Image (cartoon, rainbow, N blue to C red):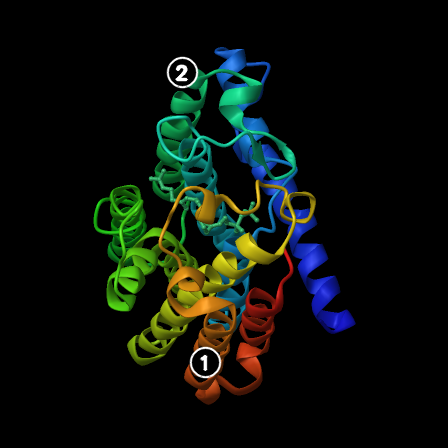
Amino acid sequence: MSVDFQSWVAAHQTRFEGVLRGLLPSAEIAPQRLHEAMRYAVLDGGKRVRPLLAFAAGELAGAQAARVEIAAAAVELIHAYSLVHDDMPCMDDDVLRRGKPTCHVQYDEATALLVGDALQTLAFQLLAEHRLNDDAAHQLEMVKLLALATGSRGMAGGQAIDLASVGKALSLPELEFMHIHKTGALIRAAVLLGAQCGAASAAQLAKLDHFGKLIGLAFQVVDDVLDCEADTATLGKTAGKDADNDKPTYVSLLGIQGARDMAQRLHREALETLAEFGAAAQRLRELADFIVLRKF
Ligand code: GRG
């Protein structure tokens, strides 16, 4: 990572933390415990990869930063909701997330369920409340895009396939289908929403969509490798869960080296889709590098 990129990431992460603090309901307001748990699940943790992708795509498309912040916050709230629900006993049943006790451990299961529900609805409230694009019809399309990426044809659908695949041998296309939905859909939406806060052409959006699809899948392939290779302290979540749970992964299907090779190929293809943007896509390229080379 270049020093310039590192300071771009740090500056955006810091500013975004302040944005999230301001958008989340105060823990002083009733129901205090729910609001406190929502803040616990969202603040002070996470790499903020999806918001960073939205910021980079927004910069490429000349979007106003204040608009991209709202789109990025909506995506991050959906992501945080998915982590809270995924960690619950009825799903992945985990006790550690972002280096802290998971939401249901810190609070209780009913609260964690409500935290996820409330974060998801807050995301859509933000998209309805704030101006994201000069064209209202276009903004409505953006709301639909996030809804599709989140629901049964996107992330929640991917999670359903994931839960049903435990102990089963999936083929590579089946595994790809699952991950393009479970992890990829929201990453793709982050890139597109960032760009749609600005003035990207249909042809540019198609390229960015393809980039988001490839880098979303690469993110998951790397996640599978890290689950095998990194330790719990580095990841801030329990390592080795996939093998323990007998889940099909890129590593179980291709082996560690095969999964690494696949991540490299997806990375290369993702960078190729950005070729025509020239210097304007530099941050997206650097984020693609970060996603594939990350150690946590
Ligand atoms: C509960 C509807 C529903 C969906 C859950 C995303 C997801 C679907 C579950 C999370 C389980 C998981 C570990 C998926 C692998 C990829 C992934 C999303 C990792 C976590 O994302 P990071 O690394 O997390 O961006 P941080 O904490 O950095 O934000």
Q: Position of residue 66 (x, y in %)?
A: 54, 52
Q: Is residue 238 left or right of residue 219?
A: right
Along the line of sight, which residue is nearer the eye, 223 or 254?
Answer: 254
Residue sitting at x 49%, y 22%: 104
Q: Position of residue 156 (x, y in %)?
A: 29, 43
Above or below, 65 relative to 44: below
Q: Is residue 178 left or right of residue 258?
A: left
- Establish whether ligand 1 lies closer than 8 Å to the Cβ of label 2: no
Amino acid type at mark 2: Ala
Q: Position of residue 291 (x, y in %)?
A: 56, 65
Amino acid type at mark 1: Arg
Give me the disc on residue 29: none
Q: Quadrant of the N terminus?
A: bottom right
Above or below, 277 relative to 71: below
Residue annotated with mark 2: 110
Residue sitting at x 53%, y 78%: 281
Mark 2 or mark 1: name the one nearer the start of the chain. 2
Secondary structure of the residue carrying numbered label 2:
helix
Q: Quadrant of the C terminus?
A: bottom right
Residue 190 in sight here: yes
Residue sitting at x 51%, y 67%: 256
Q: Is residue 134 left or right of residue 7?
A: left
| Nearer to us: label 2 or label 1 | 1
Total numbered labels placed on residues in the image: 2
Task: Give the crowd class for mark 2: few <14, some 14-19, many >=20 residues within 10 Å.
Answer: few
Along the line of sight, which residue is nearer the eye, 222 or 131?
Answer: 222
Residue sitting at x 65%, y 40%: 18
Determine whether label 2 and label 1 are within 8 Å by CB.
no
Label 2 to label 1, Cα distance in Å? 42 Å
Q: Position of residue 11 (x, y in %)?
A: 71, 56
Residue annotated with mark 1: 265
Along the line of sight, which residue is nearer the eye, 222 or 256?
Answer: 256
